[in-house]
Image: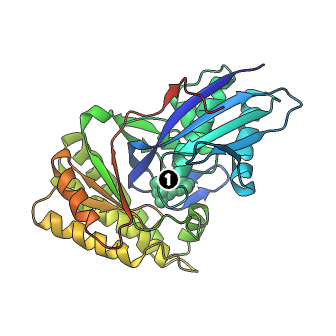
Amino acid sequence: MTGKATVVAPSNIALIKYWGTLDIDKMLPYNTSLSMTLSCCTTTTTVEVLDESDLDQVLVRTEAGELEVAGDRFASGVSAQLDRLRRWAGSGSGFRVGTMNSFPMGAGLASSASGFAALTLAVVAALGREVSQAEASILARYSGSGSAARSVMGGYVEWPGREDGSATELVRAEHWDLRDVVAILDERVKEVSSREGHRRALTSPYFEHRLRLLPERLNRVRQAILDRDFGALAPVVEEEALDLHLIAMSSRPPIFYWQPGTLRVLELIRGMRADGVEVCATMDAGANVHAICTADAEEAVVGALESVPEVQSVILDRVGEGPESSDEHLL
Ligand code: PMV
């Protein structure tokens, strides 16, 4: 069989994070997470089905627009997911994969979420198969990037903990036009991967404590989204992001994702909120800070973040509608 498909899949930012896995091979999280699907931070991936005798080829599009053979680490992560998808589809075909990101990879901006969502959906389409959103979510999660389970859908997305389940859309993007202004403080690939962070999380004395707090915190975030109540959302989102980093820093051995500029940006955002600007901060496993804000606050937030000397650049993103197929193939 030969087929080709291209999918553009977005990253997402978790407002309630998953941190710690019950089963790292099946990517079963300890807790339910809730995210906002983004719109501009995307991965575009083209998959072409090859003959059965052909080996997989993984190519990455550079900023100059050329396709280069991917590095070993990246290619082996892609091939491992291709193997899982071959088993699922009962297919022996090789695949040619071309991929590009619209944002820095591996710096705590969930490039693995958009990357594995795009790869999974493009393979399914190239094979001429159809899956429900729920099946796509489970297939994407098996990649080893749990947050990919949430990137196959749009709007505000909830992914249940402690079960072999799929994410579901809580509300569509049009329900609430929140923005995500990302302050880039460090574009380098982080030293400790999320996978290792999930493993170490259980060694933190605060891990169990956070789990006890989460059901109520999740309810508050969900309700604030349903009510479009920024005042209710902001403090809980910040509390949750700080807890993730508290657990990382108190894991054995500890993980410090922050840079000095991280603290400066966090303080700036708290100060702006105290002055009445509808903005709050969250972070994934990295130094960069996501300033979640309303559309009215966006301009002021961008200006303030750009004035911080440690901020290298600012990415403007917003809630988005989820993956799309495209005719603009990379291969
Ligand atoms: O998607 P993973 O398995 O690489 O883990 C990501 C974990 C966080 O981004 C820190 C939190 C989350 O829920 O996205």
Residue 164 visible somewhere in the drawing: no
| Residue tagged 1 | 110
- For this orientation, the residue located farthest to the front is 64
Q: Amino acid at mark 1?
A: Ala
Residue under the image location 75 percent in, 33 percent down: 95
- Location of residue 289 with respect to 6 vertically, above or below: below
- Location of residue 161 with respect to 117 vertically, above or below: below
Q: Quadrant of the C terminus?
A: top right
- Location of residue 315 with respect to 164 vertically, above or below: below
Mark 1: give few (<14), some (14-19) or many (20+) Cα within 10 Å. many
Label 1 element class: loop
Residue under the image location 47 percent in, 72 percent down: 257
Residue under the image location 38 percent in, 79 percent down: 260
- For this orientation, the residue located farthest to the right is 53
For this rendering, which residue is in front, 148 or 64?
A: 64
Is 325 positioned to the left or the right of 215 in the image?
right
- Look at the numbered disc 1 and say if its residue's Cβ is closer than 8 Å to ligand 1: yes
Is 240 positioned to the left or the right of 224 in the image?
right
Q: Position of residue 287 (x, y in %)?
A: 43, 68
For this rendering, which residue is in front, 317 or 192?
A: 317
Residue 103 visible somewhere in the drawing: yes
Residue under the image location 43 percent in, 47 percent down: 12
Q: Position of residue 120 (x, y in %)?
A: 62, 36
